[in-house]
Image (cartoon, rainbow, N blue to C red):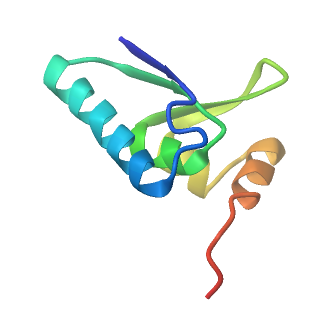
Amino acid sequence: MLLADEPVSALDVTTRVQVLELLDRLRRENGLSLVMVSHDLTAIASACDRTVVLQHGRVVEQGATASVLHAPQDPYTRALVDAVPRLPR
């Protein structure tokens, strides 16, 4: 098991990508499970199959990452997803 606590926090975009690719490669090559703790939903979306959302230390939502991030059921999860910055069109 590989535990990564905020592995891409405060990194520039290119370094973020390199770190996420490294974690994925280590996971695949060594047959590891990756547990990532992060406030960065884009990192979670790119690296994790399943997601657990905590609010005040309590699980409020869990499931397949795509479902949790694209169709959140809990109001707290919805607020987190809505807060992700998007590039202007």
Looking at the image, the residue that sits furthest to the top is 1
**Is residue 3 placed above or below 48 in the rendered structure?**
above
- Measuring from the top left, give residue 11's x and y in whole percent: 53, 45
78 horizontally vs 24: left or right: right
Q: Splitting the image into 4 quarters, where does residue 34 fall?
A: top left
Q: Nearer the viewer, residue 7 or 72?
A: 7
- Report the front residue among 85 and 7: 7
Which quarter of the rendered picture does the C terminus lie within? Answer: bottom right
Residue at 54% x, 35% y: name it: 63
Q: Residue 55, image x and y in percent?
A: 80, 28
Question: For residue 1, what is the image quadrant?
Answer: top left
Q: Residue at x 32, y 31 (%)?
A: 23
Please give left or right for residue 5 compared with residue 33 in the image. right
Left or right? Give the position of 32 relative to 51.
left
**Relative vertical location of residue 7 with respect to residue 2 in this rendering, above or below:** below
In the figure, 78 relative to 40: above or below?
A: below
Identity of the residue furthest to the left in this view: 29
